[in-house]
Image: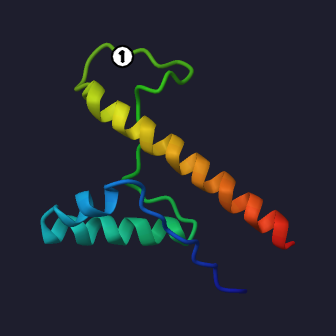
Amino acid sequence: MPLPTRKPLYFIASSWKDLKALPGPVQDTFGTLLLDVQYGETPESAKPLKGFGGAGEKFTRGIATPKRDLDLVRRRYHSAERHHATLEQQEDRHA
């Protein structure tokens, strides 16, 4: 059976700097989880981010993610989508 291919990892905006500002053990945990994702695995601790208007989202309790954090995630997500589209266009040109 062939070994899985490690997908590239791109940091958007200040996400690398933000990660490096966290305590060492937290960085290690994120690094391990990101590596798992690069190899196509979904970490057991992964949860979908709520608050993006998905089907059936109705909350009756719990801690809401602050709006400014959701806005930051949205901006970075849209930036990542644009980056991905650019990479796909480049691959199409070289194919």
Closer to the camera in the image, 28 or 20: 20
Instruction: Give the residue furthest to the left.
Output: 23
Which residue sits furthest right?
95
Q: Where is residue 87 in the image (x, y as percent from the top left)?
A: 67, 62
Q: Is residue 34 left or right of residue 21?
A: right
**Screen quadrant of the C terminus:** bottom right
Question: What is the three-letter code of the residue carrying label 1?
Answer: Phe
Q: Residue at x 31, y 63 (%)?
A: 16
Dot 1 surroundings within 10 Å: few (below 14), some, or many (20 or more)? few
Disc 1: which residue: 59
Q: In this view, does 86 lie above or below 69?
A: below
Q: Can residue 17 be seen in this view?
A: yes
Task: Please identify the quarter of the rendering in which residue 64 is found.
Answer: top left
Frontmost residue, 40 versus 68: 68
Which residue appears at 43% of the width and 45% of the height? 76
Residue at x 60% of width, y 48% of height: 82
Position of 18 relative to 32 (above/below): above
Q: Give percent across and percent down for residue 94.
A: 83, 73
